[in-house]
Structure formats: structure tokens, C-alpha cells
Image (cartoon, rainbow, N blue to C red):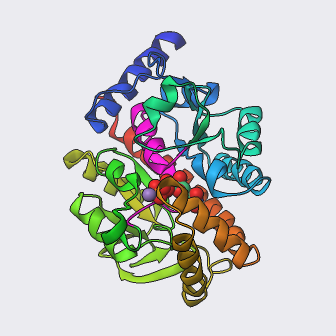
Amino acid sequence: MGAVAGRREKRGGVLRQRERIFPSGPPRPGADTELVFGPDVEAALQDGQPVVALESAIITHGMPWPANWETACTVEADVRAGGAVPATIALLEGRVHVGLSAAELRSLAQSAGSPQLAKIGRADLGVAQALGKTGGTTVAATAMVAARAGIPVFVTGGIGGVHRGFQQTLDISGDLQVLASAPVAVVCAGAKAILDLPATLEYLETMGVPVLGYRTRQFPAFYSASSGNPLEYSAEDPAQVAAVLRRHWRWSSAGVLVANPPPADCALPREYVEGLLDTALAEAASRGIRGKAVTPFLLDYLEKASGGRTLATNEALVRHNARLGAAIARAYAELLAAEGEP
Ligand code: PSU
Ligand code: MN
């Protein structure tokens, strides 16, 4: 058998495997005109090599320049060092990119804070695309794109969730709804500390999204290792996470939350963060901050109020998640390969 025929056969097998995992239909990297793939991402997907999806709202709306640029680059490098290909997902002039060049990443990061730059969630993706916008995709929009592209592992800092005071504001991040339907494992340090974490866990349970602690039975609180909310399940190594994903997607097309607590040397005490949050939330309320602006406002407020400590922790925990995400992507690709071609 020639090399080309062998490669074609292998591609066919990988796509058939993905078809089994992604009930909505097999992603076709070469044929999906909706998506613009970076060359290394496309090659890795076609060969069944591990790929890690990365969001970009953290770059455009979660961190200031130049910390956002430095973090985005080091996170991509961490994924590569872990043996996977990073695929940062963003909307550039109305085109959905899966894998950015260094120049594209830099220009996106440099525009952070500009009112031209959109924060693209689930409701915005098609609209912003049609209107030719540029922006960062949230966990929700990134997971939609990753599922469509056939990338089962996605790394972020912390997901959005049910906001404190949701009884009055109805503010519930679209991230949770998407997790209920996108077959993607989201590696994160839990949900952001600014949220109502018990309500967020309830919502995930209601929507059928399992939460798997990584070497912990405590739901992390983003900046802190524990939120005081126990978890029923934990996994001890990347292979065990991969096995969970494989079984879960035999039954469900919902996502899985892999909760990875921040490393001890960069975590902040929970009481310290809660103290800052009291004033941050009061300030947001008195200024009438609403909707998509709430999360960026609170993150920015915490950074200033902590003298940069929350930003340093945020950077460190995203890198920590990137290393774990790469290991899970590798273990999952190995698991599929070991099952053999049908
Ligand atoms: N995680 C971070 N920093 C961030 C975000 C997550 O460490 O800035 C972003 C993500 O893109 C997430 C979004 O999807 O905040 C949630 O925003 P909202 O609450 O408006 O859905
Ligand atoms: Mn919201």
C-alpha cells in the first residue's frame, strides 16, 4: 500500500471514530467552509493527533494588554510542550478561525479594550460573523466551534456560570447552556469566583454536565483551590479522564467539566478573594453594570483592588490547565488509536 493510500485510509478511520463521538455528524476539516483552520491544526485533526482548543474572550475581555498577549503565547507554548497542537478560536473580520498565526494572535491581543472588539457568546456568533466583526469567543462560542471542528478538549481559566443575585437579574452565562449540548471536555479551575458556585453546580447537574475533579473532591473557586462545595467524582490521571470522556460520550452529547484546582504556589486564600468581591459586586451594582459587561468589569476591578495578584493567579492557573489539557488530549487520542480502526 502506498503512503498516500495509507494516509487516506487512516483519515477515513479517524473520521469514522469522530462520527461515533460527535453525534451531530462528523466534522470535516477540509470541507467545512464555515471554519478557517490554521495549517498545523488542520493537519493534526486529519491525522488524529491531539489538539487543544483555546478561547479568546480571555484575551480580548479578560486580561489587559500586554499580559493577555504574554499569557496567550505561553499557554500555546505549554500546549505544544505537552505534545498537542493549540487551536485558539476567534472571529477575525467575520471569519471563524480555528488556530491563529502569531501575528493574528498579537493583533487581537493589542486591540483589547477597544469598543470595536466584540465579546462573542452563543447568541453572537452568527450575527457577528455576518456583520464582519472581529472579537474574542467566550467559553460558550468556543465550545460550539470546537465541537464542530472535532476538537474534544478545550482549555480555559474558569467558565462563566450563574451570577450572584441571579434571582433578580436572571444573569446566567451562556457557557452553561452550551456545555449541555457540546461534546467537549472543558479543563478549567472551576467557575469564576465572582459567581454563585453552588447554583452553578446545580445548573450543571440539571443540564447533565458531569463535573470531574482532577485529583480533588472539592470544586475549585478559580483563584482558590476549594469553594467548599464537594464533588462526587475525581480522576487521578489523564488516562482516567480520557476513559471517562469515552464512556460519557457513548451516552450523552453533553460536555464534561474537568475541574483542576490552581497550583498551591499561586492560589489565593478564599477569604481574601471574597473580601475583594464584596466591594467589587457593590461597585458593579451602583454603576449599573449589566449583561456582557459584568464579567469583564469584575475581573478588572479585582485585578486593580488586589494590586495585580488576581491577574498573576489567573495567568498561572490557565497555564496549569493548558498542561493538563494537553495531557488529556494525548491520552484521548491514544485511547482512540488503541481501539483500532473499525
Ligand atoms: N475565564 C477567565 N477569564 C475570562 C473568561 C473566562 O479566566 O475572561 C471569560 C470566558 O470567555 C467566559 C466569559 O466564557 O468570561 C464568561 O462571560 P459571561 O459571564 O458574560 O458569559
Ligand atoms: Mn452574563
| Residue appearing at x 47%, y 17% in the figure | 33
From the top left corner, tell me how far across and down residue 274 is, in percent: 54, 84
Taking the image in four quarters, ligand 2 sits in the one at: bottom left
Tell me if I can see residue 99 in this picture.
yes
Question: Quick one: 47 or 211, which is closer to the camera?
Answer: 211
Residue lying farthest right? 66
Image quadrant in which you'd find residue 87: top right
| Residue appearing at x 44%, y 19% in the figure | 32
Question: Quick one: 314 or 265, which is closer to the camera?
Answer: 314
Residue lying farthest bottom? 271
Q: Is residue 29 left or right of residue 76?
A: left
Count the marks: how many?
0
Residue 197 drawn above or below residue 109:
below
Image quadrant in which you'd find residue 181: top left
Is residue 127 one of those drawn in magenta? no
Question: Quick one: 165 or 341, which is closer to the camera?
Answer: 165
User: Which image quarter holds the C terminus?
Assistant: top left
| Residue appearing at x 76%, y 77% in the figure | 307
From the top left corner, tell me how far across and down residue 233 is, in percent: 32, 72
Q: Is residue 17 left or right of residue 109?
A: left
From the top left corner, tell me how far across and down residue 177 is, in percent: 32, 51
| Residue appearing at x 66%, y 38% in the figure | 116
Q: Is residue 175 left or right of residue 108?
A: left
Question: Quick one: 192 or 129, which is closer to the camera?
Answer: 129
Is residue 157 one of those drawn in magenta? yes
Tell me if I can see residue 156 in this picture.
no
From the top left corner, tell me how far across and down residue 293 is, in percent: 54, 56
Residue numbers of the magenta segment: 137-162
